[in-house]
Amino acid sequence: MKKCLILTLSSVVAMIATATTVHATPVFKKVWEEVYVGDDAPEEFAAAVKEAKCNVCHAGKKKADRNAYGAELAKLLDKDNFKTSRMKAEPEAKDEIIEAYKKVGAVDCGNGGTWDEAFKAGNLPKDEVVSSDDDE
């Protein structure tokens, strides 16, 4: 019995030690929804965003993988720079996130318009991996 307990505890410790970290930052998602969904977004778009969750920026099976929109944002936003402690201490840090969304919103999304125009039309990025943290 004692050996079984030790084995179980060892397994739990090993799983925790080897667990991968999540690359998405909840503050990015929250601020994105404030900027692009808000109260005046069409119901269909709000529902699509709710269903997509983190896949507004990510794609594929690993959170390290990003779609075209997320790859552009990753050039401007470093998740390590927006930890909860900083966001609480510096509420103005949210403005840096919004500024990054504005810059990427003006980028061509590949179908003749910008990301802002695509979102206003109710379209989300394709679920195609274009970059991965594994590439770095």
Image (cartoon, rainbow, N blue to C red):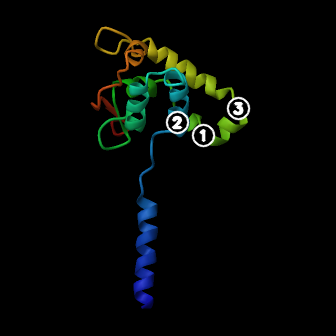
**Residue at the disc numbered 1:** 83
For the point 46% across and 69% down, which residue is it? Answer: 13
**Residue at the disc numbered 3:** 90
- Residue that protrudes farthest toward the right in the picture: 89
What is the distance, in whole Å, between disc 1 and disc 2 at their CAs?
A: 7 Å
Q: Nearer the viewer, residue 118 or 69?
A: 118
Type of amino acid under label 1: Lys
Q: Describe the element under mark 2 as helix, strand or loop.
A: helix
Mark 3 and mark 1 in contact (Cβ < 8 Å)? no
- Residue that protrudes farthest toward the top in the picture: 112
Q: Nearer the viewer, residue 117 or 136?
A: 117
What is the distance, in whole Å, between disc 2 and disc 3 at their CAs?
A: 15 Å
Q: Quadrant of the C terminus?
A: top left
Q: Residues within 10 Å of mark 2 (few under 14, many from 20)?
A: some
Task: Return the disc, 2 or 3, that comes first in the chain's sequence.
Answer: 2
Q: Describe the element under mark 3 as helix, strand or loop.
A: loop
Type of amino acid under label 2: Lys
Type of amino acid under label 3: Glu
Q: Quadrant of the N terminus?
A: bottom left
Mark 2 and mark 1 in contact (Cβ < 8 Å)? yes
Q: From the top left corner, tell me how far across and down residue 103 is, in percent.
A: 49, 15
For the point 37% across and 20% down, which residue is it? Answer: 122
